[in-house]
Image: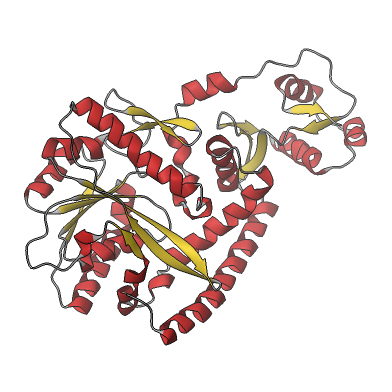
């Protein structure tokens, strides 16, 4: 399916104008936050990019951050799908093994659709409803609470537009009975749509138990839930990965959807299938992130799936034994400063630990971070020397070049 010339020209013009307005709003807001030191999200993103994608230069982190926020601004307002009629044009961006979207008179067989918070992921729900799949959406408790009414409204509008009666139900991923509920939905002929990188599961995001897997993801090992692969194996239901991303054409971003080959439950042990399949699903995401790093919303929280105990052990540095240098600088390669409300923190981007700071200590480190004359600044300092000596010994301060 191709876009009509008039639709495409209107879309390009509208996109350019809207993107520029969104980007300027984001820049103005973030400038105000920077002046107030309210930059926690930026510094957690910097930490995540440094851990998972160390090949990306640090000076690119802030521009990635601004583009991520701009894309979120557009997606949250459903700009790219300004009316339901425009969904008909999505066909041009669907590629891969998409036979499951073809029209058919027979009931749709139940499948497990696995996707990620990348690109235009919100439209995957519409894509599957348009194709006639009765859907069960599995999402975390917070999203369920905040967006259930909106998702039901979108579903109703799609049905009205298509003169159809596709149904959608939502399940709380943190419900202790979620495994049985998903299996029950598949048994009734409903397909499951689930986000692998949401990964909350029973007990919430920080829950750790022996049902979880240690999986290699990009440059780190993460702790992952195994529910998607376990469900597929137990019910003999194929998993179909769908990955969304935006491509830029003539200055406008066009959503694309890659439908990857189905992962069929194999005649092997459950443990082997679950581990290999979970690793395969993360490998798929990693491949796309290397090209579309600024389109993944999960960058803002994905550090929560790291093994923090191992991370702290790996990142512990030896204290400085030598005396304080005559001229020092703030170690901005590892540490950041931010405030939450009025409370200041020193943030270690290697270990993700945030240390509360008294107001005078925060201001001293901030001024040191900004100054170009460290020697003069240190000579004129009125801060308690115990702070300065401790920061030097811990490597928070370094000798200035």
| Relative to 277, residue 82 above or below | below
| Relative to 251, residue 174 above or below | above
Q: Pinpoint residue 35: horizontal percent, then vertical percent.
A: 70, 54
Q: What's the image's color scheme?
A: secondary structure
Q: Which residue is outermost to the bottom?
A: 6
Q: Quadrant of the N terminus?
A: bottom left
Which quadrant of the structure image shows residue 340? top right
Which residue is painted at 15% across and 31% down in the image? 267
Left or right, 276 with respect to 74, comes to left
Q: Pinpoint residue 285: horizontal percent, then vertical percent.
A: 40, 45
Which residue is painted at 39% across and 63% down in the image? 256
Q: Is residue 174 visible?
A: yes
Q: Pinpoint residue 14: horizontal percent, then vertical percent.
A: 50, 79
Q: Quadrant of the C terminus?
A: top right
Left or right, 70 with respect to 399, comes to left
Which residue is painted at 84% across and 42% down in the image? 371
Compare residues 164 and 69 and report the one nearer the observer.
164
């Amino acid at each position: 399916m191709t876009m009509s010339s008039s639709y495409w020209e209107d879309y390009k013009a509208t996109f350019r104008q809207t993107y520029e307005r969104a980007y300027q709003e984001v820049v103005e807001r973030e400038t105000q936050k920077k002046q107030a030191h309210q930059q926690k999200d930026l510094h957690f993103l910097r930490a995540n990019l440094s851990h998972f994608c160390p090949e990306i230069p640090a000076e690119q982190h802030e521009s990635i951050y601004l583009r991520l926020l701009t894309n979120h601004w557009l997606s949250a307002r459903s700009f790219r799908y300004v009316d339901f009629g425009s969904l008909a044009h999505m066909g041009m961006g669907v590629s891969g093994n998409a036979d499951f979207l073809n029209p058919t008179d027979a009931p749709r067989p139940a499948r497990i659709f696995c996707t990620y918070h990348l690109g235009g992921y919100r439209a995957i729900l519409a894509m599957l409803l348009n194709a006639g799949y009765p859907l069960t959406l599995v999402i975390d408790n917070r999203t369920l609470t905040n967006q259930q009414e909106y998702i039901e409204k979108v579903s109703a509008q799609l049905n009205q537009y298509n003169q159809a009666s596709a149904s959608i139900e939502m399940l709380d991923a943190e419900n202790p009975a979620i495994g049985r509920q998903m299996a029950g939905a598949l048994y009734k002929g409903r397909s499951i749509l689930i986000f692998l990188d949401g990964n909350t599961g029973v007990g919430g995001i920080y829950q750790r138990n022996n049902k979880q897997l240690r999986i290699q993801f990009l440059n780190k090992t993460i702790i992952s839930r195994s529910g998607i692969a376990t469900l597929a194996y137990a019910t003999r239901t194929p998993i179909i990965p769908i990955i969304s991303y935006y491509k830029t054409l003539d200055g406008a971003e066009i959503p694309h959807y890659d439908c990857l080959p189905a992962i069929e439950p194999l005649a092997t042990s459950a443990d082997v299938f679950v581990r290999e399949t979970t690793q395969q699903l993360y490998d798929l995401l990693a491949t796309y992130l290397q090209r579309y790093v600024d389109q993944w919303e999960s960058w803002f929280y994905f550090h929560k799936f790291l093994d923090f105990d191992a991370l702290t052990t790996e990142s512990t540095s030896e204290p400085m034994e030598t005396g304080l240098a005559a001229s020092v600088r703030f170690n901005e390669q590892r540490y950041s400063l931010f405030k939450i409300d009025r409370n200041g923190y020193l943030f270690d981007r290697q270990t993700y630990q945030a240390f509360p700071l008294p107001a005078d200590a925060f201001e001293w480190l901030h001024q040191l971070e900004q100054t170009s004359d460290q020697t003069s600044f240190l000579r004129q300092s009125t801060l308690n020397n115990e702070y300065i000596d401790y920061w030097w010994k811990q490597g928070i301060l370094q000798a200035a070049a």
